[in-house]
Amino acid sequence: MSLTDLFMSHDGNISHKWEHYLKIYEMELGLLVARGQPLNLLEIGIQNGGSLQIWAKYLPPGSNIIGIDINDDCLKINQNGFHIFIGDATDSVFLNNILKDMSFDIIIDDGSHISNDVIRTFTNLFQRLNPSGKYIIEDLHCSYLAKFQGGFQQEGSSIELLKLLIDSLNYDYFRDSVSQEENKFFDFYNRNIGRISFYDSIAVIEKYQNIKKRKFSTILAGNNAPVYELYLYIPRQFAIANKINFQKIRDNLIKKFKCEIADIERQLHDKNNEIAEKDETIEYLINSKSWKYTKPFRLMKRFLKISDL
Ligand SMILES: C[S@@+](CC[C@H](N)C(=O)[O-])C[C@H]1O[C@@H](n2cnc3c(N)ncnc32)[C@H](O)[C@@H]1O
């Protein structure tokens, strides 16, 4: 059953979501869920426990579902199909105590939505995300509201952290522009984050399946470059691994360069002829007697601006 159908037909504890979140969750988690393998899900913010009950119905059998809430009233909820822990998700000591070496395919932050909490929870938990796992932050509109430590382009707000994570995706192209401290941040997330999707009020941060170990290279297909020569840009190792025909590219290049050289030689020859002709005229004028005798008239013409001498 789709998440939307499960949510709409749910008659257990209340879950409180924005209407468009359901489709986003289906898009983001649909493939993972369709594989049918058990998943590990951690949700920060339990409240009435409705969302945990729905996750328990949506995820494949055998999945491990954990909810964390700061409010110990949540212990009243019947833990059927999930586990509840009480504590502060911004507290790394608490998290390490309860989660031990657990890691997750899906982490959802639906906690306080206060910017500081969102950021600290993310920095605490991102490392517990499995390869290809998704870290989902709900209700990011709070990042624009003062009572959640937010505001438009407000320094320190949760959405501003996410904007830095976008920069980290592209860190290989500005590595020289940051301090050592900033380097640690950008380098870590550059190697770990493969994708960030932004929606209205929700962001999904996806981990690479394999940690990125080096700057990506460009790759080429084909052997001919009649317009723009890209030969020099191919990393040689890559070209060999991908059986790019270097010999053919080289031969084509040499042919092209030879044509260009022949063309330049032709132009050079024409220019030399022009120069030779001009030299002859100059020689003739220097030795011409009439040219010498008419010199005063030419000077006068220039002085009087007489046009027809
Ligand atoms: C929006 S509700 C969660 C709703 C629930 N996920 C659902 O979909 O029905 C937010 C919950 O986060 C809890 N919370 C707030 N700050 C927290 C923190 N620092 N650590 C853990 N839980 C927190 C609150 O007690 C509250 O129950």
Image (cartoon, rainbow, N blue to C red):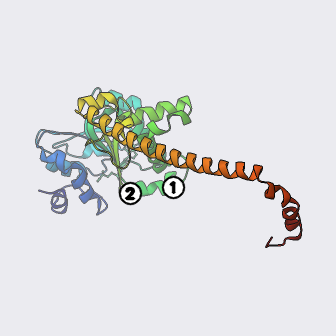
Asked where in the image residue 69 lies, by quadrant, the reply is top left
| Secondary element at image label 1 | helix
Marker disc for residue 29: none
Q: Amino acid at mark 1?
A: Lys
Is residue 144 placed above or below 127 in the rendered structure?
below
Say which quadrant the C terminus sits in. bottom right
Q: Is mark 1 within 8 Å of ligand 1?
A: no
Would you name the residue on which mark 2 appears? 201
Q: Is residue 53 visible?
A: no
Q: Residue at x 23, y 33 (%)?
A: 242
Would you name the residue on which mark 1 appears? 147
- Residue toward you, 137 or 236: 236
Say which quadrant the N terminus sits in. bottom left
Q: Amino acid at mark 2?
A: Ser
Is residue 58 placed above or below 215 in the rendered structure?
below
Q: Earlier in the sequence, mark 1 or mark 2?
A: 1
Q: Position of residue 146 (x, y in %)?
A: 53, 56
Instruction: Please state the total of marks drawn on the protein image.
Output: 2
Q: Quick check: 200 left or right of 49?
A: right
